Amino acid sequence: MDIKTILVPFARDLHTSAGLSTAIAVARLMGARLIGLHCPAETAVPWYVAAPVAIPPLPDPPLPDPPVPDPPVPGRPSAEAEQSFIARCSAACLKCDWIADHGFLPERLAFHSRYADLIVAGRGDGNPQGKGGLSPRALGQLVLSASAPLLIVPPGAEETFRPQRVLVAWNERREAGRALHGALPFLRHAKETILLSVHPPGFDDAPDRRALAYLEAHRIHADARINFAAEFEAPGAILAQARAVEADLLVMGAYGHARVFEQALGGATHHVLESADRPVLMVH
């Protein structure tokens, strides 16, 4: 897999495009085209998305959907953001496209991700004067519904993104396998790849040699490491190991499921979405 098309969201204008610097860095590394997606600022999560558990098919009474913003028109922030976006891409010698859309931003990102190899989105820091970004809840919805891997950029991390040391959180589940596949373009450029497994105490401490052999087939040498921790301690152990090895990028599967009336994230996914202090590549 190669990364040739990168999707990056804009909530209001270029100044709130959290993740753009990282998207530009990845595009230059991969020789990719950038697609800027402009949508209005993140609105309240629709009632059918915010529910943590299944909702009866006929809720009584149903909450109204949030109002749909007017489509962007010339002269509004979309036009200004488009000009600034094109200028940033031109300065970096990158090809780019611009999409002006309207609706709930995570939903529109998930739709347009069908035509992209990667999404790069910043995580908001809650500062109205900052660079914006998506909330952990919105990122959770996006990673569970997107067709492409999602690169999440935490506040303060986007100016220095250079994935030289990559930590892959590994187990034998489908989500971890898809994350490993989606990370191959980054692993090919990395100088060091660490395959981390977190097992409960007493578990077999042998590394997964099949995963190592798979990477070797792609000419990627990985160092296998095993941490022992209880299941509820695993998310903290993963982030602690990423800090300990000074990883530039954390790769992991996103666990959970998204349905029309249900959205539920696994504990590790939720913890990392809220607490990661470095870029995270997630795939569901």
Image (cartoon, rainbow, N blue to C red):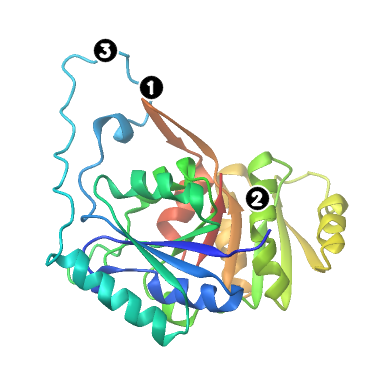
Question: Dividing the image into 4 quarters, which one contains the C terminus?
Answer: top right
* Within-10-Å neighbours for mark 2: few <14, some 14–19, many 20+: some
Residue 205 versus residue 219: which sits nearer the camera?
219
- In this view, the mark in front (2 or 3): 3
**Residue at point 46%, 76% (across, down):** 24
> On the rendered structure, is 184 left or right of 224?
left
Question: Dividing the image into 4 quarters, which one contains the N terminus?
Answer: bottom right
**Residue at point 31%, 62% (across, down):** 133
Of mark 2 and mark 1, the one earlier in the sequence is 1
Above or below for 169 versus 98: above
Q: Is residue 118 visible?
A: yes
Above or below for 273 versus 107: below
* Within-10-Å neighbours for mark 1: few <14, some 14–19, many 20+: few
Q: Secondary structure at mark 1?
A: loop
Type of the residue with mark 3: Leu
> On the rendered structure, is 115 left or right of 189?
left
> On the rendered structure, is 7 left or right of 170?
left
Question: Which residue has dot 2 on it?
Answer: 229
**Residue 158 placed where, x, y %?**
43, 75
**Residue at point 86%, 50% (across, down):** 210
Residue 274, numbered circle: none
Mark 2 in CB contact with mark 3 (< 8 angstroms): no
Quadrant position of residue 73: bottom left
Question: Which residue has dot 1 on it?
Answer: 54
Of mark 2 and mark 3, the one earlier in the sequence is 3
Above or below for 91 versus 183: below
Type of the residue with mark 2: Ala
